[in-house]
Structures are given as structure tokens and as C-alpha cells.
Image: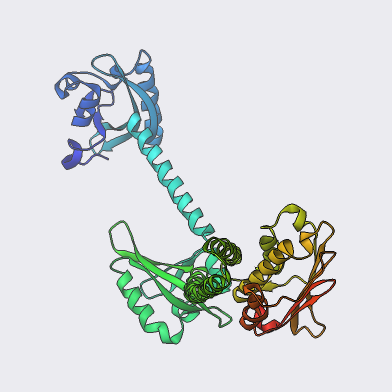
Amino acid sequence: MIVDESFDFAPCGLAVLAPSGRFVRVNRAFCGWTGFSARDLLRGSTFADLIDAEGAAFFADLVAVLDRRQEVDDIFLLLRGRSGENVPVYASFALRRDKTGARGTTIHVATTRGERRALDEAELRRGRQATEQLAAIVANSMDAIVSVDPAGHVLNANRAFSEIFQYEPAEIAGAELADLIVPQEDRAGYLKKLSEAAVKPCRARAVRRRRKDGALLDLSFSTAPIRDESGDLAAISVIYRDIAPLTRAAEHIEFLLREVNHRSKNLLAVVQAVARQTARLSPSPDEFIERFMARLAAIGCSHDLVVSRDWRGVQIADLTKNQLSQLEANARDRIAISGDFLEVNPRAAESYGLALHELSTNAVKHGALSAPGGKVDLSFQLDRDGKHYTLTWRESGGPAVRTPERSGFGGTVLTRMAPLAIQGECALDFTPDGLRYRLSAPLAEIVMG
């Protein structure tokens, strides 16, 4: 049980006892724990002396058990140290006989400190818990995680691997990973990364992998070596993460940048046209500023809606509500809105927004909404064949209407700018009962896509 060469320097407390319990030999650790020197213990002290008053009875029972079983393991004892303090230990005993008979019989004792053992057991528990937690993380990860041997054969794979690549666990175990998911044209790159992973971790990079049904998936691919206690390569971990959402996000950002660039140029052109026409037809600088800022605000309302929707289109109902929100409540409440409310593209939103601004502003200043009993019917209609979309504005109950002697900027917006932007047609009529306006455009010109 006790090898002479390692006896003195063993990290545990070791002792050799005569059958009577007298110390024959002790090592440094045992002396250090108890506070006695080897000389003190070898002068005739017995193991029972280091236990409480029942020590002699305990040792007698121990010898009787050893005589039958030869070994007794892990008995918790409180040894009495030199200064009187108790030293908790776990002790194991072994009876050894040699060919000389009784005179050669000795009892070998190995002890470990109770505190140290408690710490070791706690460390083992923590290690076990960490291993279990890591296993749970791997098992429930949304990433496909698989370990392969250095030759690329699958050792283990988590549930996400089966779900992403649509293989049953029985089909995965032991198979060559490349045969399962790596397209033929990507084999060389995969094998190179696998050989590199045997030396050091490889950072994630985008790859394409094949699902069981043949569909190709965009994934990130990272690898790392798994080493055993001796530092030798035991396996290679491979992690695949679905990056399709990131790819779609990047494509959408690229689309937005192109759209912003395109729309900014168009918007500047519209603002310049509005500024020139407003300045040309304004009798004074103050009136120019008032009209221009109102029209700029109308453009801004449409633009805000477009941006808030990531340039994906605007509901015509929301656009109408935003444009009419500039009116006082009394005027706004006398506009009846009905029809088919579609989602229109940014260009159409800008055109409809300007048209609605000019129509509502004119109605408040000169048309139906300038009189207490006046009202407006606003409708949006998709025709029967589903190919054209029409905005219709009808005023009634207002002052008598006359055809103006000259067309202002509002008329230019309604009859030229708005229809031209959406490849549409318009009709502006000044009937005695009230202004009538119709703007019709091909559906393909105003909807997204």
C-alpha cells in the first residue's frame, strides 16, 4: 500500500502501525496536520492516543475487522492535534502480513484532510454541473453543433443539426460530414478548414451547405479542436449558424441605400420645381414663404410615412389622414373618405400627397370648406378589371364656382406634376356645384414591386 520512495513526500497523511496501534513510521503530511513531530509519535505513541476517550475501543474493533476483511476504507475521524484542536480526516486502513507471521504484521493508514476532501468534492460537483450546463446549452442551441473525428466522421450532433439539415439522428452518427452536407464544389475548402482546425480554432466565415432534400443554405462555419487530458487531438467541433436573416437584412440595407439615393434626387427635383413655381406665382416674398413652407410640409408628411415604412410603401388611408391633419377639425370633419385603400409606392405617395394638399388647401380658402355647409366626398376606387386606380374629389355646398382666368401652381400640380409622376390621367372641372377632380393611374405604376 505504501511505497518507500514516495512515502515522505506524499500529499496525504501516511502512517505505519504495529498491531498494537503503536506508530512505526509517519510521513511529513501526517506530522504537519497533527502538529506532532515524527520523534514524538515514534516514542511509543499509539493511533488510539490521537482519538478521544473511546480511541482504544475503536482501535480494538478496527483490528478485529481488519483481521477478517484486510481493508477498511473512508472512516471519518477527529484526530486530536498537539495543541488540542480537532483535525477532521478520512482514514483508510489496510492489514499487511509478511512471511514472518505475526511479527511482520503492520497496519497501513492513509488519511486525507476532511476540509480538503470537502473542497475536492465541491470542485467535482461544480465541474459536473458545468459539464451538464454545457451539454444542455449545446443540446438546446439554435446553432447546428457537431463533433467529428480528425477524419471527418460524425461523433455527436445536437438536435438543431438534425432540424436544420433534416437528417434523422441514426443517419448522422458515424457518417462522414462532408457526404451529408458539403456540396461537391466546396469539399476542398471544407477539408482545408478541417485540417486547420486540428491545430487551432478557425473563425466563422460564410459558407453554403446542402440540406438532405438538396436545398442550399447560407450559414456561418466555425471550427475548433477538442483535446483530451494529455493534450492530444480527440475531436473537432463544427458549428453552423443560420445567417439567412443577416443576408436578407444586408440585401434590404443595400436596397434602402439605393432607394434613398434615388429618392433624394427625385425629392430635390420636386422641391426645386415647387420653389420655382411658387416663387413665380407669389405676389410677395411673404406670401411665397407661406405657400412654399406649406407645400414643403406636405412633401415632408408623405416622406415621413415612406421612411417610417422602410421605403416599402404607404397605405393610402394613412397618407390621406396625414395630409388632412393640417386642416382644422371643423374642415376635416366635413370630408367623407371612402373606397379601396391600397398600399402605394413612394413615388405615388408623393404625387397623391401633393395633390391632396393642393385640393384641401384650395377647398378651405376658396372652395366648399370655406362655407359652413360645404363638404367634400373623397373616394379611391380600383376599377373592375383591377388595372387602374382612381382618386376622385367632389366638392358641394360651397360658394359658386367659376373657372379661374389663369392656372396657379395648384393647378399645375393637379394637372401636370401628379399625373406625370404616375403615368396617369386627370380631369379638373370647375362645375357650378363645386370643384371636381379625378386622378387615374395604372395600378402597376402606383403599387410596390
Q: Position of residue 204 (x, y in %)?
A: 38, 68
Please name the residue shown 56% across and 81% down the image. Answer: 215
**Which quarter of the figure is the N terminus placed in?**
top left
Up-down relation of residue 129 to residue 186 (above or below): above
User: Which sits in the foreground, 446 or 3?
Assistant: 446
Q: Is residue 345 left or right of residue 27?
A: right
User: Which sits in the foreground, 396 or 65?
Assistant: 396
Up-down relation of residue 259 to residue 301 (above or below): below
User: Which sits in the foreground, 447 or 142?
Assistant: 447
Q: Is residue 336 left or right of residue 353?
A: right
Q: Position of residue 125 (x, y in %)?
A: 43, 41
Quarter occupied by residue 56:
top left
Q: Position of residue 114 (x, y in %)?
A: 35, 29
Residue placed farthest to the left in the image? Answer: 39
Please name the residue shown 28% across and 14% down the image. Answer: 84
Q: Position of residue 34 (x, y in %)?
A: 24, 22
Q: Tell me if residue 288 can be seen.
A: yes
Q: Is residue 162 left or right of residue 7?
A: right
Quarter occupied by residue 16:
top left
Up-down relation of residue 78 to residue 372 (above or below): above
Quarter occupied by residue 377:
bottom right
Q: Is residue 434 left or right of residue 18?
A: right
Total labels drawn:
0
